[in-house]
Image (spheres, rainbow, N blue to C red):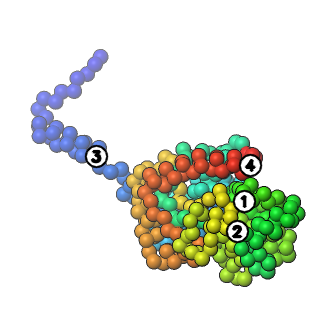
Amino acid sequence: MTRTLNTTGVDRRTLLAGAGALAASSLAPPAFAQAYPSQNITIVCAFPAGSGADVLVRYFAEELRKKAGRTTIVENRVGAAGNIAATYTARAKPDGHTIHIHAGSSTAANFHLFKNPPIDPGKELQVVATLNKQPFMVVVAASSPYKTLRELTDAMLKKGDKASYAQSNTTGKVMGELYKIATGVKAVEVPYRTANDSINDFASGAVDYGMMDPVAALVNARAGRWRMLAVSTPERVQAVPELPTMTEEGVPGVELFGWFAAMVPAATPKPIVQQLNTWFNEIERTDETREFLKTNGGDPWVTTPEQGQAQLIADQKQWEAHMKAAKIEPQ
């Protein structure tokens, strides 16, 4: 038996008021946008504590704490060239309380480094803000006789397959192989868990040169352990304008730039993504952050979430080409 709701006798103004309230509630912003953040924020770092990447991650974690008014906890989830941290973030609850701060360039590259990548970054992660642009650097021991990249290249060509080079991440690996292809150098790759793990081998002469991230390169150069010879970017960077590009030093075709970003699970609501973008962009625009990035070899890079995501997706395609050019087979 079907029952019909009888509205006879109900005040028409009451019905209209109720309908108006319902309509207004449907247009109101969702509650999570107003309540965020509602708990501590976890910042996921793909490298060990004390590494160059960790220094950058902890800086932005502390600055975000001031903006968000919540405790930020850095978790170092190390392994698989960064895929462990990226996968952990992609699988986290998409509520803005788990943020991965890492090189977007490496995150994109890792999709092509493994035969069975655990995630598709462009589909399963969302960039909320880009943080910097940075070069990688060709370095040698401070005691090395090579003062320029041209001198290093000439010497490594003579040394043949007895030459060796250090790297500690995806970008360094690709950069090293592209350098060898461009020059004909036959150096053997020596991978390290972190750049700092290679310090003793540089000092002993066990490795001839390295392809290193700017934080590690600058820290060790300032400490008198390494000498920087060139940057991997197409143009010189503001942070270290005295360093020539590899192209300037007679090595064409090696034009790589790294960029750090804050990323969250792809399903994170847009209001939260936008709030994080606002906070990170405000952090980047401070003189303190500009000086911090400059000290660590990077230039600020402020974008919208849409621009950052477009860069991540474009990099996935670009790094596929880099991998093929470097003749690196997926592991």
Q: Earlier in the sequence, mark 2 or mark 4?
A: 2
Is residue 49 shown above or below 264? below
Front residue (pair 153, 285):
153
CA gap between label 4 and label 1 equals 13 Å
Q: Is residue 44 left or right of residue 25?
A: right
Please state which amino acid type lies under the numbered disc 3. Answer: Leu
SS at badge 1: helix
Q: Nearer the viewer, mark 3 or mark 4?
A: 4
Residue 202 image point, x, y percent = 80, 73
Residue positioned 48% across, 59% down in the render: 129
- For disc 3, the marked residue is 27
Is residue 275 depicted above or below 313 in this figure?
A: below
Chain-order first, disc 2 or disc 1: 2
Closest to the camera, between mark 2 and mark 3, is 2
Q: Residues within 10 Å of mark 2 (few under 14, many from 20)?
A: many
**Discs 3, 1 touching: Cβ within 8 Å:** no
Mark 1, residues whose alpha carbon is within 10 Å: few (<14), some, or many (≥20)?
many
Asked if the residues shown at circle 2 and circle 1 are in contact, with their CB atoms under 8 angstroms apart, the answer is yes
Residue at the disc numbered 1: 179
Secondary structure state at the residue bearing disc 3: helix
Asked if the residues shown at circle 4 and circle 1 are in contact, with their CB atoms under 8 angstroms apart, the answer is no
Of pointers 3 and 4, the one earlier in the residue sequence? 3
